[in-house]
Amino acid sequence: MLVRNTFPYSRLLIFLGGAVLAIAVLHLFSSQIVYRTPQMSPVLFPVMTIFLMIFHILVASFMFMKYLCDKHRLYLMAIACAFGGSAVLMLGTLSSYSEWLMCTSLSNINYNDALIYYFFRNIMMAVLFICSIFLYTLRHRDIHSVRNHIIAITLMVGFTLGILILSWFYSSHHPRINLTIIDNLTRNFTPLWHNYLIGTLITIWCLTLIVMLVITRMRNIFWFSGYFFCAFFIFTLCLLLPADSIAGYSWYKSRLFETTATLFLIFVLLCDVFTLYRVSNNKYQSSYQNSIRDPMTRLFNRSYFYDALTKQMAKVSSASPVSVIVCDLDHFKRINDRYGHLQGDKVIQFVAGVLQDSVRATDVAARIGGEEFALLLTNTHPDAAAEIAERIRKTVSEHDEQSSNQSLPERITISVGVFTATAQEKEIEICVQRADEAMYQAKENGRNRVEIWQN
């Protein structure tokens, strides 16, 4: 039966509500700053542009590094090109404030060049965003060869460089190419801006947002940051739509709004990094635990036991002894032969649970063989180790089929050997060997008993 992949309208409502709330808060914040600093308004624009340029460089670097970590995410390179090219165009915007850069008065500002860079920056980012969305749909397909990546990245970088060159020519750097969006004398927008250009920018960002919503279907927090970014750009353009002159507050409010919105985007990306780190760390911890634990009993394995014993032997002394307990199930082969290996596994798991419940958090309980277990007890003297061993032996022998919830087919016993080290041994295997010898002595003396190694 086919399951219809319906659009997640509930997530869309959450996004719309969050976008409206975020835009309202940022708009109020930007308005308060601009209205409270009227004397700083001419200086505020290049300062905000510098901050915005730095933020875009950070986002571009972040996307590039994520691509290097996972080459199947080719779509990230389109976003990296978008923000990297945007940073370069903002550097061109700052060149329009040449007197400010030279720390002189702001009497001669080329507003037309600044808006030309702004227009081309919007076009470039929107097109590269759409490119990244379509590359996202191909992430699981067999297209990720070095050749294909080189071709795709070359095209994206080429498009970005093409936009940069066009914006450079259409600004005041080529005598035969002229694009007038603002009259620098009156600071008023021309009909070209009001009738065509700003409507084109709003349309292309709305198209980008729709394509992003339809294709990505609001799957993860990464694309949510893209949705918000598109919504923020649409709103900044709507701020400029009714303005007749660049001398008003709208231009500064839109730039401050874009700056704070980009900072919000960086925050969302940091949340995405934290999520990825948490998932990666959980996988690492799970993998590490699987590497040091016995898969059936979840006790530590033989390798970890010897590593822990090596570390403890480096600190052992008469005041801080280390005790090793080795125990082995009695007549375990008969359990396997009579009841089967599945029942034998249940017996081993039951005994492992008894051992785990009998040690402290600083101790180590391990399975070092088929039906052989070992305990590493830190700061434990011989008498205390013997008491623990006896308690374990008694607990195991007192259970039968009913009291063990059918884990044991019959009453079982174990033989236990104990050795306590009060001085460093040349070879740590000697500690286990001596506890093992004591355990075999317990078997020879009738089984179901505890023996302490005697020199």
Image: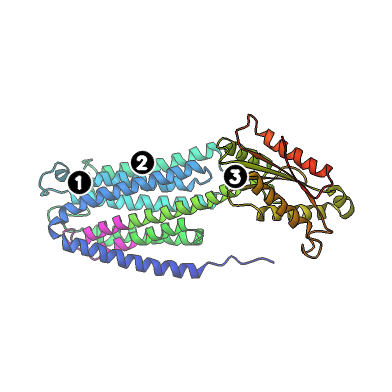
The numbered mark, 1 or 2, whose residue comes first in the sequence reads 1
Q: Tell me: 333 left or right of 101.
A: right
Residue 96 got which mark? Answer: 1
Report helix, strand or loop for mark 1.
loop
Q: Check disc 3 and give the amino acid type.
A: Thr
- Residue depicted at 46% across the width and 41% down the height: 153
Mark 1 to mark 2: distance in Å?
Answer: 20 Å
Q: Check disc 2 and give the amino acid type.
A: Leu
The numbered mark, 3 or 2, whose residue comes first in the sequence reads 2
Residue 378 got which mark? Answer: 3
User: Which class describes the residues within 10 Å of circle 2: few (<14), some (14-19), or many (20+)?
Assistant: some
Q: Check disc 1 and give the amino acid type.
A: Ser
Mark 3 to mark 2: distance in Å?
Answer: 66 Å
Which residue lies under the disc numbered 2?
A: 161
- Residue depicted at 28% across the width and 52% down the height: 118
Q: Quadrant of the C terminus?
A: top right
Report helix, strand or loop for mark 3.
strand
Q: Tell me: 371 left or right of 340.
A: left
